[in-house]
Image (cartoon, rainbow, N blue to C red):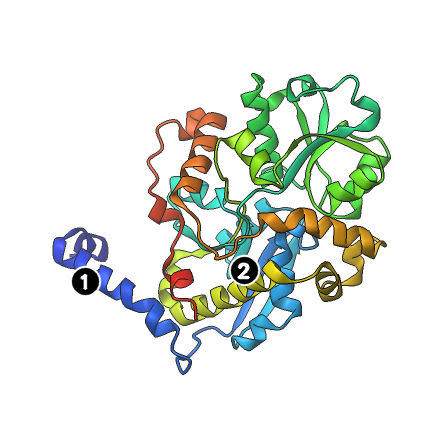
Amino acid sequence: MNRRDFLLTGAGALAFAALSARLPAFAQDPGAKIEKPSLTLGVGGKPLLYYLPLTIAERRGYFTEEGLTVAINDFGGGAKSLQALVGGSVDVVTGAYEHTLRMQHRGQDIRAVADLGRFPGITIAVRKELAGEIKSIADLKGRTMGVTAPGSSTALMLQYALVKAGLQPTDVSLVGIGGGTSAVAAVKRGEIAGLSHLDPVTSRLEVDGDIVPLIDTRTEEGTRQLFGGTNPAATVYLRHDFVEANPVTTQRIVNAFLKSLAWLQTATPDEVADSVPEDYHFGDREFYKTAFEKARPMYSPDGVITEDGFQSMLSMLKTLEPAEFGNAEIAFAQTFDDRFVKAKS
């Protein structure tokens, strides 16, 4: 009998459940050996406020407190960090929750272990000089829009909004413009009609008077308006075989991020601005503080993904990609392993 057949038996399932239930308690033991103390983490656009919990965990020493040495690889977009995880060049990713559903459907066991963002925090906006012509998502047909990278969460949300407006995902050309100053420059130079992007890029362009928002999911109201419910955004996700082989390491990763999320709930804008690299400010510290305050509501207070959020994400994929996901059967538990956030110290 192979491992899969064993797990399908009643006794095997019970034994596996018992082992799984013990893992977090064992992993939380302060004296437990960290199986892999040196890690490589992938992210797509680290300066974005979408990934602020990662920068805080790094800069405030939470990884070090948990006995981890974390090397961070910043890729051009979330899709590229996912590819790095699948290819084995990184151990863990901070990336969109949507990636876990997509990979489960493709037979690759990748699961989130902590939620970082309750709302996507993505704004779809057009250049101000085009606002008279483009008054709704439907008016974007035939236009070129900037996203962090094709296949990323910014691209996915724009395509979902297009479908909900009665268009096809291909009715708009998507161009990868990165996650920092290159994105701001693309708008200011008039290279694109608008963008689907994240703070602080969108706040910088708003403050400068360069864009007019069409959809804003930095708030619960805006998120529910588009999705009809919450929609989990940035998460911490790993290959499930890594989690099984490294439960202590996984717990320490989650602990570091939970410390970061807790700190962000009460931190002042000045404390946040002091904690991030100066170049994250886009040359304007006061602006960065304002952008953080706009983004603060999207951060998860506890790292937990709800089943409501899972259903919202699955519904989005079914709507956006009916050929692939129309009949998809994905279980919530396949996308989020909640044992480690529940075992937080």
Q: Mark 1 to mark 2: distance in Å?
A: 31 Å
What element does badge 1 sit on? helix
Give the percent coordinates (x, y) of residue 170: 60, 23
225 or 241: nearer the viewer: 225
The total number of labels drawn is: 2
**Disc 1 residue type?**
Ala
- Residue 94 visible in rendering: yes
Q: Is tag 1's residue or tag 2's residue first in the polypeptide sequence?
A: 1
Residue 126 position (above or below residue 109): above
- Quadrant where the C terminus is found in the figure: bottom left
Residue at 54% from the left image edge and 22% from the top image edge: 164
Badge 2: residue crowd in 10 Å (few <14, some 14–19, many ≥20):
many
Give residue 178's mark: none
131 or 195: nearer the viewer: 131
Residue 99 position (above or below residue 52): above
Badge 1: residue crowd in 10 Å (few <14, some 14–19, many ≥20):
some
Q: In this figure, which residue is indicated by the disc labeled 2?
A: 90
- Residue 242 visible in rendering: no
**Going by the image, does 114 lie left or right of 151?**
left
What element does badge 2 sit on? loop
Residue at 35% from the left image edge and 63% from the top image edge: 244
Residue at 53% from the left image edge and 33% from the top image edge: 224
Give the percent coordinates (x, y) of residue 304: 44, 53
Give the percent coordinates (x, y) of residue 110: 42, 51
**Disc 2 residue type?**
Val
- Quadrant where the N terminus is found in the figure: bottom left
Q: Quadrant of residue 89?
A: bottom right
Q: In this figure, which residue is indicated by the disc labeled 1?
A: 15
Q: Quadrant of residue 144?
A: top right
320 or 323: nearer the viewer: 320
